[in-house]
């Protein structure tokens, strides 16, 4: 199964832990699951985690950068998606389409309008946790 994770889910995992962290851990722990990202998404992850307002220590930021560099499956995305609702989100839709991802996990309701654009299931982190992570647990 292939998963694209929106930046807001990653930030929540880093800052708050809890369900977003558990979901990311579930993906790491299950070899049948892949966290998919494009170069553009990885750049955004790192740029946002480097913002001073989050007050992350160099050690915490370094740990997450290592996770990003080690565990993510990098794919090439050779096209753009026109998503006028929020143009910054278009890269996540394009990545999900290019990877034929099973899920796009996000906390951003703007993506609800994009569900008709792709075959990927757009899902909240809490719903993904309940439907996928809790199965058999």
Image: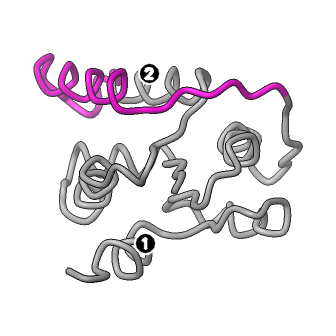
Left or right, 110 with reference to 10 = right
**How many neighbours does mark 1 have within 10 angstroms: few (below 14), some (14-19), or many (20 or more)?**
some
Q: Is residue 64 left or right of residue 77?
A: left
Magenta stretch, residue numbers = 50-78
For marks 1 and 2, give the CA distance: 26 Å
Q: Is residue 50 above or below residue 133?
A: above
Label 2: how many residues lie within 10 Å, few (<14), some (14-19) or many (20+)? Answer: few
Q: In the rendered structure, are the residues bearing label 1 and label 2 in contact, judged by CB atoms less than 8 Å apart?
A: no
Q: Nearer the viewer, residue 115 or 35?
A: 35
On the image, the x and y values in percent for residue 3 come to: 52, 52
Residue designated by label 1? 128
Colour setup of the view: one colour
Q: Which residue does the image show at 50% across and 25% down from the upper left?
A: 42
Near-viewer residue (30 or 11): 30
For this view, does 43 lie left or right of residue 129? right
Quick check: 43 above or below 111? above
Q: Residue at x 39, y 74 (%)?
A: 132
Q: Quadrant of residue 46?
A: top left
Task: Please identify the quadrant where the C terminus is shown.
Answer: bottom left
Q: Would you say 123 lies left or right of 56 here?
A: right
Q: Residue at image x 75%, y 47%?
A: 97
Q: Secondary structure at mark 2?
A: helix
Disc number lying in front (1 or 2): 1
Ranked by sequence position, the earlier of labels 1 and 2 is: 2
Question: Label for residue 47?
Answer: 2
Return the x and y of residue 38 as percentages of the image width and height: 61, 28
Q: Residue at x 18, y 25 (%)?
A: 63
User: Where in the figure is residue 85, as x and y percent of width and height?
Assistant: 79, 54
* Residue 16 placement (x, y as % from top left): 20, 54
**Magenta stretch encompasses residue 76:** yes
């Amino acid at each position: 199964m292939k998963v694209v994770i929106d930046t807001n889910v990653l930030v929540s995992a880093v800052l708050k832990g809890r369900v977003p962290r558990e979901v990311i851990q579930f993906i790491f722990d299950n070899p049948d699951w892949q966290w998919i990202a494009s170069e553009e998404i990885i750049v955004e992850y790192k740029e946002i985690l480097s913002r001073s307002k989050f007050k992350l220590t160099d050690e915490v930021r370094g740990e997450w950068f290592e996770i990003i560099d080690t565990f993510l499956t990098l794919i090439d995305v050779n096209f753009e998606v026109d998503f006028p609702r929020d143009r910054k989100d278009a890269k996540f839709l394009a990545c999900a389409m290019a990877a034929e991802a099973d899920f796009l996990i996000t906390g951003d309701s703007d993506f609800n309008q994009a569900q008709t654009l792709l075959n990927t299931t757009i899902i909240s982190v809490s719903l993904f946790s309940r439907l996928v992570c809790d199965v058999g647990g």
